[in-house]
Amino acid sequence: MEKVFINKQDQAIAENDILGYDEGAVYADTKQHSKEVFDLFKGYVVEDGLKQVSKHDFSKLKKVGLFTRYLYSGGKDDAYFKGRNWKFEHYMDERHHLKCPDGWLKSDINLLDVLEYICDVICNVRAKGDMELLMSQVTLEDADLRLAFENTVRYLDEHAICANYDEIIEKEEENSEDEDD
C-alpha cells in the first residue's frame, strides 16, 4: 500500500478555537479529511485486499499434486507425503488460515485476513449446502479479533503521513512525474 498524505488541519480547528472558525476553512478541511479517509480505505481494503484475495488458496494450486493426495487420503497426512505435513504448510502459506493446525494464532493477523477467512468459510459451507455448519465454522476468539484490530491500526498508521498541504501537492506532482517517465 502506498503512503497516504494527511493534510494538517487549519490551526483554529485543530485547537478548537471557536472564534477562529471560518466556514470556508471548515468546509475545505472536511472535504480534505473525507478524501484522506477514502484514500486510506481504498489503499487498504481495495488495493491490499484485492491483492491478497487474488492469491487465495495459491498453495493448493501450486502444490495441486500434494493437495490431491491429501484429499485422497481423507485429510490425513500419511505415507503419501513422505514426512511432509501438507496441511501445516498450507495453513502457514495462506493468510486466511488465522490459526495453524496445532491451534496457535499467527501473530501478524489483520482485519483483511479475518474478512478473507469469513468469505472462505461462507463459500465452503454454501458449496456443501449445509448452512447449519456456518456459525460453528466461523469462529474467532475475542483476543484474536483484538490482535487483528491492533495490527490493522498499526499498519494503517504507518501508511498515513501527516504533511502540510503544499508538501502533499509537491509529493503528488513528484509521483505523477515518476509515472510519466
Image (cartoon, helix red, strand yellow):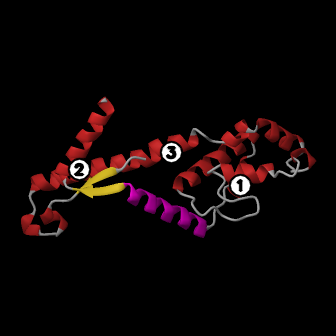
- Identify which residue is drawn at 73% across, 40% down: 60
* x and y percentages locating residue 168 in the rendered image: 23, 48
Residue 28 within the segment the image draws in magenta: no
Residue at position x 7%, y 65% from top? 20
- Residue 89: percent from left, percent from top: 74, 51
Residue that extends furthest to the right in the rendered view of this protein: 79
Local secondary structure at mark 1: helix
- Report the residue marked by disc 1: 137
Residue 167 at x, y percent in the picture: 20, 50
Quickly name the residue at label 2.
32
Q: Are marks 2 and 1 in contact (CB under 8 Å)?
A: no
Say whether disc 2 or disc 3 marks the residue closer to the N-terminus. 2
Residue at far top of view: 180
Among the two numbered marks 3 and 1 on one chain, the one whose residue lies closer to the N terminus? 3
Q: Nearer the viewer, mark 2 or mark 1?
A: 2
Q: Amino acid at mark 1?
A: Gln
Q: Amino acid at mark 2?
A: Gln
Q: Position of residue 49 (x, y in %)?
A: 51, 45
Read off the magenta span. 142-159
Residue, x 26% and y 34% (percent of image)? 177
The residue shown at (87%, 46%) is: 81
Numbered label attached to residue 49: 3
Screen quadrant of the C terminus: top left
In terms of secondary structure, where does tag 2 sit? helix
- Report, in whole angstroms, how far the alpha carbon at label 2 lies from the one at label 3: 24 Å
Q: Amino acid at mark 3?
A: Gly
Q: CA distance from mark 3 to mark 1?
A: 22 Å
Badge 3 crowding class, 10 Å Cα cut-off, few under 14, some 14 to 19, many 20 or more, is some
**Quick check: 51 above or below 162?**
above
Q: Earlier in the sequence, mark 2 or mark 1?
A: 2
Mark 3 or 1: the one toward you: 3
